Amino acid sequence: MYCWHGGSVVKNTTKKGRTMAHQLMRAVPRLVARRAFSTSLARAGGGAGGMPAWQVNPRNVYEDRPDFPMPNVPYVSELSDAQKALKAKEAGDWKSLSDEELKELYRLKFHKTLAEAEAPTGEWKTVVGGTSLIIALTFVLYIIQKKYAMPAMPETCNYEWQEAMMKKQLQMRNNPVEGLASKWDYENNKWK
């Protein structure tokens, strides 16, 4: 394809030598898919049916996390009459609020303080106990299978049998160049 560019005719290609039509043919399906996905998200977004966005979006759920200490939603979503009055008082001068009222306002927004969220929970005891229980049950299952389900070891695993097989291999002079017989001194009856 050629196009008119600044007074001269130039071949319309990109750096990789592809024509613009080829790039457009490759890009259109991606753009259509992206557009369809983005409009479906916009329809499912906040404000649907008169509900606040934090109630519609499932990602906006309150949780105490030390790595993200500012959640998107408040801890208390349904306010009582006393809490509504306290929120109205919050809009005024903060110096007129008592310490108890400030703590109550904080607890409306957050469930735990940062120190409470970072405090050890003792969850490691449950994890260690559960892991130990699984290991113990696995060991008991192994012993039961070894005693009742597994057949007896074959004769070939017996040490005396293996020793007798080695003597037989040496008597037959099996593989005398590089194998077992090459390492045995037949005149003195011992290993070289």
Image (cartoon, rainbow, N blue to C red):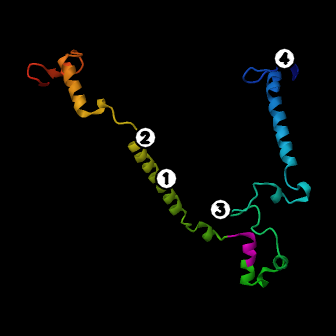
The nearer-to-camera label among 2 and 3 is 2
Sequence-wise first label, 2 or 3: 3
- Secondary structure of the residue carrying numbered label 4: loop
- Circle 4 is placed at which residue position? 1
- Circle 3 is placed at which residue position? 65
Q: Position of residue 168 (x, y in %)?
A: 20, 21
Calculate the distance from the C-alpha at mark 4 to the C-alpha at mark 2. Answer: 76 Å
- Circle 2 is placed at which residue position? 149
Sequence-wise first label, 4 or 3: 4
Q: Residues within 10 Å of mark 1 (few under 14, many from 20)?
A: few
Q: Position of residue 87 (x, y in %)?
A: 82, 76
- Of all residues shown, which one is farthest toward the left? 188
Residue 93, above or below 190: below
Q: Position of residue 181 (x, y in %)?
A: 20, 19
Mark 4 near mark 2, Cβ–Cβ under 8 Å?
no
Q: Residue at x 88, y 59 (%)?
A: 51
The nearer-to-camera label among 4 and 3 is 3
Sequence-wise first label, 3 or 1: 3
- Secondary structure character of the magenta stretch overall: helix
Residue 72, above or below 112: above
- Circle 1 is placed at which residue position? 134
Calculate the distance from the C-alpha at mark 2 to the C-alpha at mark 1. Answer: 21 Å
**What amino acid is labelled 1 in the image?**
Ile
Residue 116, above or below 56: below
